[in-house]
């Protein structure tokens, strides 16, 4: 199917998607509005002015989402020859994978960040060439302008999609470890919310209903977990049970848990960081 050059309404829609990634970023909205206004105008150098605005917007996104101090703190960062700080590629890498080790991202998550970054980096090169107004660099063809802006916005949006994909893969890779970490805590610690329900409360098992991941900083990944714990409630001693003077009941209660993993070892939950809180309010209703 032949490529169809998007019209300005379609390009503006992509600009809105980008703005939605940064709802409080007034600078981004201002630059986008300005780029679209001049791009759609009859200004004879509108393409060059529009390219300059989009280039500044791209730089703004890369630097705000991947500050120098965060990128340089990552284990995978190294200063590239003839540079004084993070490269564009390194900033894109940080936006997508944060401080996660490169080997983990490549071998476990199987994500190829370089292929994701390539279209954006190429569009930046084209933006750079178009920002300087020279006799032979005037950009005034409407279709060429639209293609340039559309490709640039697509490149940025692709980076956000890649970042989400990375987090989803981390989420998937940690599921079994999260389950085991909660189970270990339920079995090894005496939780007051369960212990108070019977003479002897034992855990039969649990289910992880959902959990979310937050990249807290360059050292830790923090997880918030919700689930259901299944318990056996024993009333009376074992001899009471044998003499029909006690009872054993099964029940279940929702729980919430928090825990951390080190970014350097993202597949290993730090066991002493696990905290589980069981909601036993249904027992008393």
Image (cartoon, grey):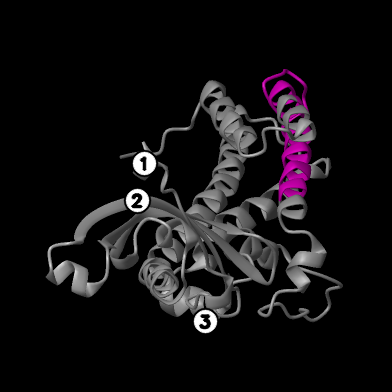
Of residues 182 and 8, which is closer to you in this image? 182
Query: Where's residue 130, x and y in %?
Result: 74, 44
Q: Earlier in the sequence, mark 3 or mark 1?
A: 3
In the displayed structure image, the side of residue 148 where residue 138 appears, left or right: right
Question: Callout 2: few (<14), some (14-19), or many (20+) C-alpha neighbours within 10 Å?
Answer: some
Q: Earlier in the sequence, mark 3 or mark 2?
A: 3
Residue 103: which numbered mark, if any? Answer: 3
Please state which of the two labelled residues, at mark 3 or mark 1, is closer to the viewer. 1
Query: Where's residue 163, x and y in %?
Result: 54, 56
Query: Where's residue 89, x and y in %?
Result: 66, 66
Magenta stretch holds residue 43: yes
Is 83 placed above or below 217 here? below
Is 137 placed above or below 262 here? above
Please state which of the two labelled residues, at mark 3 or mark 2, is closer to the viewer. 2
Of residues 35 and 27, which is closer to you in this image? 27
Residue 282: which numbered mark, if any? Answer: 1
Of residues 83 and 93, which is closer to you in this image? 93
Does the CB distance between marks 1 and 2 fall below 8 Å?
A: yes
Magenta stretch holds residue 229: no
The quarter holding residue 211 reads: bottom left
Give the spatial CA distance, label 3 vs label 1: 46 Å
Q: Quadrant of the N terminus?
A: top left
Give the spatial CA distance, label 3 vs label 2: 39 Å
How many circles with numbers are drawn on the protein?
Answer: 3
Looking at the magenta stretch, what is its main secondary structure?
helix
- Magenta-colored span: 34-61
Give the spatial CA distance, label 1 vs label 2: 8 Å
Does the CB distance between marks 3 and 2 fall below 8 Å?
A: no
Question: Callout 3: few (<14), some (14-19), or many (20+) C-alpha neighbours within 10 Å?
Answer: few
Mark 1 element type:
helix
* Residue under label 2: 253
Is 63 placed above or below 98 here? above
């Amino acid at each position: 199917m032949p490529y169809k050059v998007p019209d300005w309404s379609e390009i503006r829609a992509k600009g809105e998607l980008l703005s939605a990634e940064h709802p409080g970023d007034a600078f981004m909205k201002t630059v986008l509005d300005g780029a679209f206004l001049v791009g759609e105008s009859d200004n004879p150098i509108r393409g060059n002015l529009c390219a300059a605005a989009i280039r500044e917007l791209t730089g703004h996104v890369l630097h705000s989402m991947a500050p120098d101090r965060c990128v340089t703190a990552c284990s995978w960062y190294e200063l590239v020859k003839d540079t004084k700080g993070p490269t564009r590629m390194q900033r894109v890498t940080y936006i997508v994978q944060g401080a996660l080790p490169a080997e983990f991202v490549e071998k476990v998550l199987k994500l190829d960040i370089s292929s994701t970054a390539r279209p954006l980096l190429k569009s930046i090169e084209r933006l750079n060439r178009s920002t300087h107004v020279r006799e032979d660099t005037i950009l005034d063809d409407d279709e060429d302008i639209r293609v340039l802006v559309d490709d640039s916005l697509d490149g940025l949006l692709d980076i956000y999609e890649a970042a989400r994909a990375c987090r989803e893969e981390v989420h998937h890779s940690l599921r079994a470890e999260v389950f085991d970490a909660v189970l270990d805590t339920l079995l090894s610690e005496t939780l007051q919310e369960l212990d108070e329900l019977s003479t002897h409360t034992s855990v039969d098992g649990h289910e992880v209903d959902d959990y979310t991941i937050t990249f807290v900083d360059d050292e830790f990944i923090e997880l918030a977990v919700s689930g259901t714990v299944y318990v056996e409630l024993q009333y009376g001693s074992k001899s009471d049970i044998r003499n029909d003077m006690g009872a054993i009941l099964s029940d279940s209660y929702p729980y919430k848990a928090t825990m951390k993993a080190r970014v350097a070892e993202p597949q290993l939950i730090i066991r002493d960081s696990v905290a589980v809180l069981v909601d036993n309010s249904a027992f008393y209703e």
